[in-house]
Image (cartoon, grey):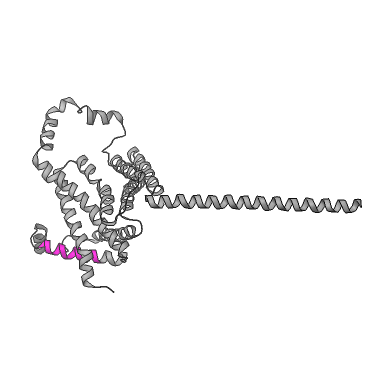
Amino acid sequence: GWKIASWFRLAFLPATIYLVQNMCSLLAYQNLDAITYNVLNQTKTLSAAFCCYLLMGKKQSTMQMVSLLVLLSAALVMEGVIPLDVNIFLSSYWMGGDKSSSNDNDTADDATLSPRHFSHGVLPIMAASFLSGLAGAITQKSLQLGNRNALLFTMELCVASLLLLLASFVTSDDGLQIRQRGFFSDWNYLTIIPILTNSAGGILVGLVIKYAGTVRKGFALIFGILLSGLVQSALDEDRSLSGEEVAGGVLAALSLWMHATNPYVQQQQKQQQTGEERIRASKESATTTKVMATSKATSNGTSKVVRGRKSRKED
């Protein structure tokens, strides 16, 4: 049966982590350039695999770890961080770009090396990526090992998040504006669309984590980027699917195949499988030898009967 104590214990911790993660992401977005933000933000799949290992003991095989790096590359290609044009890549990252804009580059380098860039940009996005993996691992543990219902757990997370947001509204500027203007200020019928899509997305994410795991959710997110590009190219005549999106989709599919076909197998299981294969092979060999012996004995008996019949005819 459902209990408030279990809801508080299982739902409030990941809800708090998700809240802190969103705050860190917002802070980093305000203090980082787009490339740095996207590169560091895509490490959340790696942190998910690491946290699943810490909390649940789920290990990744060597090929699965390689597939996660391929997935990271797919995300960076789709985001345009890794360009497909080698000349652009070399001129941007190795040759320092256009020399005529050296003053702008010096200013950007000073901003990049500033303490605020690290304390308000790099550290928050790294923390957000780690917290995303941690919350996903905690959710997966509750859903899989605790056998929690996915729909019920999604509702528990929503209620816990609402309570935390209400508490934050007391001291935040957003809460002050809501108290002054009202909660439904500037709402229209289009406001319902993102609410419904986010709600449906939360339910689907819960089901994916329960039956596939938070690492596989990272694969789904990358394919979601590709799907968004396909939908946009279909709806917008002026926009076509870019080469980066196609290449990223191919890399994502390759990484998913590598991760699915190379699961981690413990050494004991490998030895057990090897022993079972040897026993099976010896049994098959013994069965084959027995069949051959039986066949030989049958053929000998048949030849003796034939010779006996011939001898009787001659008599």
Residue 240 can be seen in this image: no
Q: Quadrant of residue 111?
A: top left
The one of 102 and 271 positioned closer to us in this rendering: 271
Q: Residue furthest right?
A: 315
Q: Residue furthest bottom?
A: 1
Magenta part of the chain: 156-170
Q: Is residue 36 left or right of residue 170?
A: right
Q: Residue at x 16, y 42 (%)?
A: 32
Expressed as whole percent of the image width and height from the top left, the position of residue 114 reads: 9, 38
The one of 29 and 8 positioned closer to us in this rendering: 8
Q: Residue at x 54, y 50 (%)?
A: 282
Expressed as whole percent of the image width and height from the top left, the position of residue 234 reads: 36, 47
Residue 203 can be seen in this image: yes
Q: Residue at x 22, y 49 (%)?
A: 129
Expressed as whole percent of the image width and height from the top left, the position of residue 189 reads: 25, 61
Residue 146 colored in magenta in the image: no
